[in-house]
Amino acid sequence: MTHTTSRRDFLKQTSALTAGLAFSSWTGSALAMSSLNQSLFKISLAQWSLHRALRGGKLDNLDFAKVTKEEFGIDAVEYVNQFFKDKAEDEKYLAEMNKRAADVGVKNVLIMIDGEGALGDPDAKKRTQAIENHHKWVTAAKTLGCHSIRVNARSNGSYEEQQKLAADGLRRLTEYATPYGINVLVENHGGLSSNGAWLAGVMKMVNLPECGTL
């Protein structure tokens, strides 16, 4: 007889196995047994994981939180701005997103932002425009109860030039986001941002606790 394991069951089984391995050296201890009855970690589901369904019209952005909870048993989500690109300033739509998430006990964690310009653009006017393009997503993240936005540190030029340009854009965006209680997180997402030493240097230049990396 064929047995089909649901995605939720798979996650539970994987967590149980991880717990067993992590505490194998403490077998029999009261501490280990107590810990095994608790979740070892909390995870969130990135909306990009379901990008084919979203792009194909099989899943609507408003239903993402519900699917995350009911299909995967996960209670936190990371949104991708391209799936509600024209709704960043739509208060009614954002309120509905909040309601849908709250109805199923899901926490909105962050918004991943793409397609709003290069924060490290060598052209000062374009760099400023890119920073300002991100502003609406900062306020949207605040409305959704998120703690962060995820951005890219794209630029052009030499290694050092790109560091300075990216740091400038990130610092200015972070200074805007901080009063809203929103952190700015940079992903190693292509270009020099995938170079750990380069990105670490950018973070040192920014030198703000509200700006970090994924």
Image: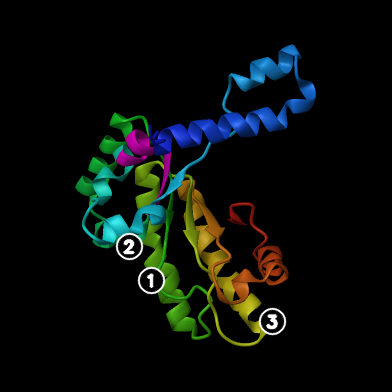
At a point 28% along the width and 62% down the height, the residue shown is 85
Q: Is residue 50 magenta?
A: no
Secondary structure beneath dot 2 equals helix
- Is residue 203 found left or right of 99 in the rendered image? right
Asked which quadrant contains residue 40, the reply is: top right
Asked which quadrant contains residue 193, the reply is: bottom right
Region rendered in magenta: 67-79
**Residue situated furthest front in the rendering:** 1
Can residue 132 be seen at all in this image of the molecule?
A: yes
The residue beneath circle 2 is 82
Secondary structure beneath dot 3 equals helix
Nearer-the-camera pick, 172 or 196:
196
- Image position, residue 123 (x, y; %): 49, 86
- Is residue 148 found left or right of 139 in the rendered image? right
**Residue type at the position of mark 1:** Gly
**Residue situated furthest top in the rendering:** 30
The residue beneath circle 3 is 160
Q: Is residue 71 magenta?
A: yes
Secondary structure beneath dot 1 equals loop
**Given this view, does label 2 or label 3 mark the residue nearer the observer?**
2
The residue beneath circle 1 is 115
The residue carrying pointer 2 sits among few (fewer than 14), some (14 to 19) or many (20 or more) residues within 10 Å by Cα, namely: some
Determine contact: label 1, label 2, CB under 8 Å.
yes
Q: Give the colour scheme shown.
A: rainbow
Q: Earlier in the sequence, mark 3 or mark 1?
A: 1
Q: Earlier in the sequence, mark 2 or mark 3?
A: 2
The residue carrying pointer 1 sits among few (fewer than 14), some (14 to 19) or many (20 or more) residues within 10 Å by Cα, namely: few
